Image (cartoon, coloured by chain):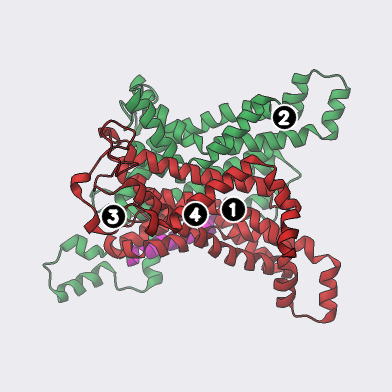
Chain colours: A red, B green
């Protein structure tokens, strides 16, 4: 219990409770996560189950419009799927891809950053140059080209089954330099401190010093960039799906929902595109605002572009 | 002399990166699709196929085939598009003016809007206007470029009916360059796509210019300029602003690459007949030569802009550490 009390009295919680923007953002984010996680229980309809979908229900406007129906709060799409349900499920897919892609980025980036910063010299030079080159080709460009080539090679059918894994891998691998640079910058500073010397004198192995002693002291910048990276990964996924290189319409993420609705925007059925778009923007905004707040509170040493 | 050595090393690096890109391009060509099937169809016997393969050199060792690919590429021969039945490079270059004009218009908007706003936010860091601009910028960063595009179309084309939502409109041909900048219709078509494309970079540049400017305003020489009794306009724009430009140039150069990536999204939403739109069509048609031509052309643009930016940076700033920067 004392741990809980200590946590409640900490500066972190105090500043959180004093900042309405942070609290609202966290609340909105929590709502999204819960909604997505509980989608199978709370969604009015299972959009993956063809038996629950009736094509006769297609293109019904949201409930606040004249022809809206109470059954479908946000209306239905061209296939007669309930928009609210597809959005709940879609948010889940978007969040899953975002979080796993960032975990992969972190795994690769933190490891390389630790090694690069701790060993220095040629190893460092090699990895940092690799990071420079990779960053100079924009992530989105690399992702578009890699996915386009795989889609052409696999054929659309097989690709749709593998899409979620491909998206996580591509977004995960493309952005490791962000973590590597930040972690490296922190390792360079930590390496000079006395506790590291002490650990070295005791005769601990390099791996142990890197992962057990230095890594815990670089956690706050990792946390800060992780929030922004999750937002970026979700945006990247949405963009790729919008281009038709991501999740298929049968198992839509927010991006593929927007893509599927876009062709109807000119015929007056705006809600199929606009509602998932607004959901996506609110989600990204909540994560970014939370990230901004975290950066202000933790004030870590971040990699600065020069 | 140092600069010359740097120049040579930098060009060497650019060549290496281009070589890597062409290896990637070639291995895609090698593994994706069968050129023979595109040529003769299914009705040819296996023995004839093998003979044809030998004749076309498809059974040669990798290095030989890559050498031939490279020799062709250097001379501008990147194969023939399966769909258009024309040289792939020619098809791509036909679309280049559309993409270029879009990027140009977007860059112009970015510079004209972000410089005054960024400087203003730095000079009056606590005013409500600054708070509003900074607030807008975080909202702006959170809206993906294709959504900005969709909302622009929804508001200005569908609801208000002020501006066209797709295509380039009327264009004028000047030699091999088709431009939409000289007709009213062409310009009207350019407005929404250019705003959409610039929207993603604007917040970034406003924040960047503001940050750099605030840092410069705290330096000794600016304080000295104030002490000398110079007018505030002179201090801000002649002394301070000039020195915020360096980092802005570097980041700007790097962002041109990102901007090209975003043209794919913008062109898709607005059906803008540029290279990005063409590329996605090529992907859907599995038009391998066109895919590779796009990768190589875009790779070349990336490498050239990055190299030029680095060179400009070294010329403008003699203090720059000229080792340890890569393509």
Q: Which residue is mark 2?
A: B125
Question: Which SS type dominates the magenta stretch?
Answer: helix
- Residues tagged 3 and 1 counted as in contact (Cβ below 8 A): no
Secondary structure under badge 1?
helix
Marks 1 and 2, how far apart at CA: 26 Å
Q: Residues within 10 Å of mark 4 (few under 14, many from 20)?
A: some
Q: Quadrant of residue B255?
A: top right
Which residue sits at x=68%, y=38%? B246
Marks 2 and 4, how far apart at CA: 36 Å
In the rendered view, would you say A196 is above or below A219? below
**Left or right placement of residue B236 versus residue B85 in this view:** right
Quadrant containing the N terminus of chain A is bottom right
Q: Are marks 1 and 2 on the same chain?
A: no
Q: Residues within 10 Å of mark 2 (few under 14, many from 20)?
A: some
Q: Per the image, is B25 magenta?
A: yes
Q: Per the image, is B97 magenta?
A: no
Which label's residue is closer to the chain start, 3 or 2? 2
Q: Are marks 1 and 4 on the same chain?
A: yes
Q: Which residue is mark 1?
A: A227
Q: Which residues are magenta?
A: B10-31
Between tags 1 and 2, which lies in front?
1
Which chain contains the residue that carries disc 3?
B
Q: Quadrant of residue B243?
A: top right
């Amino acid at each position: 219990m004392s741990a809980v009390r200590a946590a409640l009295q900490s500066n972190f919680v105090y500043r959180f409770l004093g900042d309405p923007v942070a609290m609202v953002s966290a609340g909105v984010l929590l709502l999204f996560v819960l909604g997505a996680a509980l989608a199978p229980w709370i969604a009015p309809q299972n959009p993956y189950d063809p038996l629950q979908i009736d094509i006769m229900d297609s293109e019904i406007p949201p409930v606040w419009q004249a022809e809206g129906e109470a059954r479908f709060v946000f209306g239905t799409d061209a296939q007669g799927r309930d928009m609210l349900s597809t959005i709940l499920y879609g948010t889940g897919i978007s969040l899953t891809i975002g979080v796993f892609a960032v975990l992969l980025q972190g795994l690769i980036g933190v490891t390389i950053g630790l090694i690069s910063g701790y060993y220095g010299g040629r190893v460092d030079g090699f990895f940092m140059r690799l990071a420079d080159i990779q960053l100079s080709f924009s992530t989105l460009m690399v992702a578009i080209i890699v996915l386009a080539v795989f889609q052409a090679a696999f054929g659309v059918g097989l690709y749709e089954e593998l899409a979620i894994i491909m998206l996580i891998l591509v977004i995960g691998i493309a952005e490791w330099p962000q973590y590597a640079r930040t972690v490296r910058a922190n390792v360079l500073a930590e390496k000079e401190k006395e506790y590291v010397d002490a650990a070295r004198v005791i005769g601990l192995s390099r791996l142990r010093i890197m992962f057990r002693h230095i890594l815990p002291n670089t956690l706050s910048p990792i946390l800060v960039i992780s929030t922004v990276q999750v937002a970026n990964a979700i945006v990247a996924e949405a963009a790729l799906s919008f281009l038709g290189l991501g999740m298929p319409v049968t198992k839509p993420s927010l991006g593929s929902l927007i893509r599927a609705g876009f062709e109807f925007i000119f015929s007056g059925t705006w809600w199929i595109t606009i509602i998932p778009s607004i959901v996506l923007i609110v989600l990204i905004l909540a994560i970014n605002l939370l990230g901004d707040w975290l950066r202000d509170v933790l004030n870590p040493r971040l990699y600065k572009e020069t | 002399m140092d600069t010359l050595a740097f120049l040579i090393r930098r060009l060497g690096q650019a060549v290496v990166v281009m070589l890597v890109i062409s290896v990637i391009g070639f291995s895609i060509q090698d593994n994706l699709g069968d050129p023979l099937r595109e040529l003769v169809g299914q009705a040819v016997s296996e023995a004839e196929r093998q003979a044809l393969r030998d004749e076309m050199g498809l059974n040669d060792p990798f290095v030989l085939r890559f050498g031939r690919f490279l020799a062709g590429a250097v001379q501008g021969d990147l194969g023939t598009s399966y769909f258009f039945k024309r040289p792939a490079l020619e098809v791509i270059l036909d679309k280049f003016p559309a993409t270029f004009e879009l990027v140009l218009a977007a860059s112009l908007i970015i510079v004209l809007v972000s410089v005054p706003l960024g400087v203003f936010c730095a000079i009056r860091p606590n005013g409500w206007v600054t708070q509003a601009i900074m607030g807008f910028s975080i909202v702006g960063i959170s809206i993906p470029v294709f959504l900005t595009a969709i909302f622009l179309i929804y508001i200005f084309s569908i609801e208000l009916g002020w501006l066209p939502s797709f295509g380039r409109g009327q264009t004028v041909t000047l030699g091999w360059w088709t431009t939409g900048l000289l007709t009213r219709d062409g310009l009207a078509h350019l407005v929404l796509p250019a705003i959409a494309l610039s929207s993603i970079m604007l917040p970034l540049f406003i924040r960047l210019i503001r940050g750099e400017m605030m840092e410069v305003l705290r330096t000794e020489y600016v304080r000295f300029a104030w002490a000398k009794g110079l007018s505030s306009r002179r201090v801000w724009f002649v002394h301070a602003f000039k020195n915020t430009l360096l980092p802005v140039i570097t980041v700007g150069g790097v962002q041109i690459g990102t901007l090209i990536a975003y043209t794919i999204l913008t062109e898709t939403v607005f059906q803008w007949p540029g290279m990005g739109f063409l590329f996605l069509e090529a992907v859907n048609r599995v038009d391998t030569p066109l895919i590779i031509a796009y990768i190589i052309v875009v790779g070349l643009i990336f490498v050239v802009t990055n190299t030029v930016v680095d060179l400009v940076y070294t010329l403008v700033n003699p203090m720059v550490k000229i080792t340890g920067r890569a393509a």
